[in-house]
Image (cartoon, coloured by chain):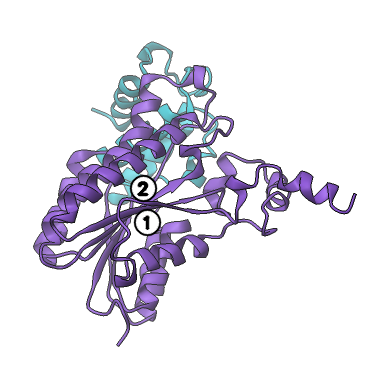
Chain colours: A purple, B cyan
Amino acid sequence: MKPLEGKLALITGSGRGIGKAIALKLASQGCDIIVNYFRRREGAEQTCEELRQMGVNADLIKANVGDPAKIDEMFDTIAEKYGHLDIFISNAASGVGRPIMEIDSKAWDWTLDINAKAMLLCSQRAAGLMEGRKGKIVAISSLGSKFVWPTYAAVGVSKAALEAVTRYLAIEFAAKDISVNAVSASAVETEALKFYIKEGLVKEMSQTTPVGRMVTPEDVANAVAFLVSEEAYMIRGQTVIIDGGTSIALVAPLMEKSEGK
Amino acid sequence: MSVEEQVKDIVAKIAHIDKSIMSREATFKEMKADSLDIVQALVAIEEQFDIEIPDEEAQKFRNFGDFVSYVEQEVAKKG
């Protein structure tokens, strides 16, 4: 029997990119998946089709997680149709890439609502469906929560909030036997990366990673799969960094150049 | 109310634009609508008319008229 057989996971923003990779990984362990998407139906349908071909059940729910009313509608649907949930992955993200002086109230709200508030509101609803099921919740963060990247201020702040929400949920949900953690990746090769980085720079960036390549969506999915497993039972409220060592090796490229001198 | 009028109302409200400058020829830049305004308008219009406007299509809009025409066409398809 596969480790996640009989379990049901909701993954927000799983029509493409990291969310899709997580869906495929959990499905490979037998997990049934609810694919949430917002604006790209085609990709989400494609993901569902791939999941079904893997032999698991896959369902599709459209919802803008930046809108509390839509979050409620999504969970009402899940409650009515399934009555339970075992795994919730808060992956959907958006953001406004601007210098800090250009971040207005609207840009702040849009980014924080989707990236941080949604984790809180979805987890509150998910907890109600996880009673007695040893639920697992994982949030997808990014290194921008702690480190500065040009035009990433709004998203970076939202990810810092997301990681803090993760810690508080982890403690309050411990009594419910629900584990809550986050994974934080450096730049991951997805479509979304193009919004922040010029294409030619990706190669240059991969050379500054100590392991010599970029983080892939599958790298993130592997860490998520561990955190939702029983082996990770005692890990609570943590943010696991997946960056090939980038964040702790500030001068790695320089070290390489000076080697042997 | 026509589709065009409804689209105007939604975009004006979201992007705080005076409807008098929203001609079919006006570009989003001329209307001072930024990228977030456009995304939020797309979301609101998709919801209002129960249609989908893929980003790939939205990127082709040269001006407000293209936007309105696309919405009109999608609404007509739904009958």
Q: Amino acid at mark 1?
A: Arg
The residue singled out by tag 1 in the image is A41
Q: Chain of mark 2?
A: B
Percent position of residue B36, x then y: 43, 29
- In the picture, measured across the screen, residue A143 lies left or right of residue B2, that is right
What is the chain identity of the residue bearing mark 1?
A
Residue A60 seen in this snapshot: yes
Residue extending furthest right? A261
Residue at image location 19% in from the left, 66% down from the top: A134
> Could you tell me how far apart the alpha carbons at marks 1 and 2 are, in whole angstroms?
8 Å
Q: Which numbered tag is attached to residue B52?
A: 2
Element type at mark 2: loop
Asked if residue A246 is positioned above or below residue A110 in the image, the reply reads below
Q: Nearer the viewer, residue A68 or A227?
A: A227
Residue B51: x %, y % from top left:
32, 46
Where residue A198 appears, as percent x and y from the top left, is 67, 41
Same-chain check, marks 1 and 2: no
Give the vertical position of A68 relative to B11 (above or below): below
Q: Residue furthest bottom?
A: A1
Residue A57's x, y, as percent?
27, 75
Q: Is residue A65 visible?
A: no
For residue A238, above or below residue B71: below
Disc 2 residue type (three-letter): Glu
Nearer-the-camera pick, A175 or A3: A175
